[in-house]
Image (cartoon, rainbow, N blue to C red):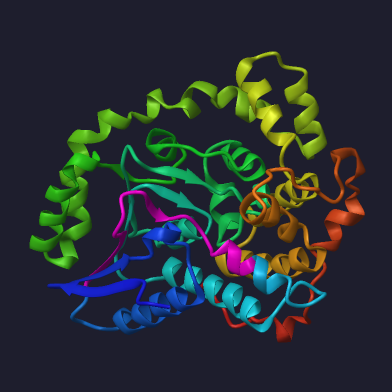
Amino acid sequence: MPNTIRVETHGQTGLLTLDRPKALNSLSLVMIRTLTRTLLAWRNDPAIAAVLIRSSSEKAFCAGGDIRFFYDAGRATPAGGSALLEDFFTEEYALNHLIHHYPKPYIALMDGVVMGGGMGIAQSGPETCLRIVTERTKMAMPEVNIGLFPDVGGSYFLPRVPGQLGNYLGVTGETIGAADALYASLADVYVPSAQLPALDALIAATPGQVLADAIRAFTAPFLTDADPAQSNFAQQRALIDRHFGHATVAEIVASLASDDHPFAQKTLAVLNKRSPLMMCVTLELLKRGGTLGVADCLRLERSLVRRCFEHREILEGVRALVIDKDNAPRWDPAHLKDVSPHMVNAFFEPPWPEHAHPLRDLLDT
């Protein structure tokens, strides 16, 4: 694979540019290893005061993991796994943990599509992180659409957004724009794409230790262009909180079905297309993740990934969406009424003893 990440330094700022445009910067194992190796090197380097990650393409920051690779590797064995697949998720989640606890300002320019694995390398930042969106931002955790669940730390950051918005985003997999991202605290500042050349000039001219503050000051005048108070989430917040506050997906669906509001009916239609099983697994995951630290969330997700490939729901989802492109997945089970608590709980049975978990060494201290 050609070099898909450009690694540079501008003064005291380390720049990581995702450069796999034909694949919308979908993360490969090579890319994950390059990001991890570079961030580890910069972590204790006194010459680097801040890190900025961005894309070479206006179409996408990062559209997620390489799902065609997931499909090919998952079909390689009857159990739905391979050594490379195991390595991919273990190393991706370790990267998410590294970013979350990074000791230096970590700035993510989320221009274009930001989904799945792209959210993991943007949302996993520490309190000193800065997440930038533009009018081209299309943000989602759409994993239920391919028979997976919102991973890469989604079990940590989705339960911590306001109200029931995390449940809505995780269970529906719906896409949001800049104003909704700001409203949901999944972004910090907004900049029009027309101002990106000026932002690039600012980045090149500003010392790394004050870069985040300089970007905040630069973007402050543009906030009214993506006013969170005028976002779709702001308008529909009461409906989302009412419907997605229920304890089960079946109750959420019944609640939506009883509401003739156009938003409720549109959302119901979306849920009818998703994997019934993985919607239920997702809701349970978000319940559990709301009480866990980052390391435990990532360990839980890592276990769930193994179960997902054993069940093979993800292979059917990727087949329908990416391989055959018939958009007619044959979910197992096909109907929500056939999803039992036993089926859901089976996904949370640890596949490894605690001492052998591939992410056993992650700490949140």
* Residue 100 figure quarter: bottom left
- Residue shown at the point (85%, 44%) measured from the top left: 334
One can see residue 148 in this view? no
Examine the rendered structure and indicate whether residue 163 appears above or below residue 3.
above
Taking the image as shown, residue 230 lies to the left or right of residue 292, namely left
Taking the image as shown, residue 208 lies to the left or right of residue 348, namely left
Residue 340 location in percent, x, y?
91, 48
Q: Which residues are magenta?
A: 49-70
Examine the rendered structure and indicate whether residue 92 appears above or below residue 144.
below
Examine the rendered structure and indicate whether residue 204 appears above or below residue 11.
above
Residue 30 location in percent, x, y?
46, 78
Residue 154 location in percent, x, y?
57, 55
Q: How many marks?
A: 0
- Residue shown at the point (53%, 55%) measured from the top left: 116
- Residue shown at the point (49%, 68%) measured from the top left: 96
* 66 magenta-colored: yes
- Residue shown at the point (88%, 55%) measured from the top left: 343
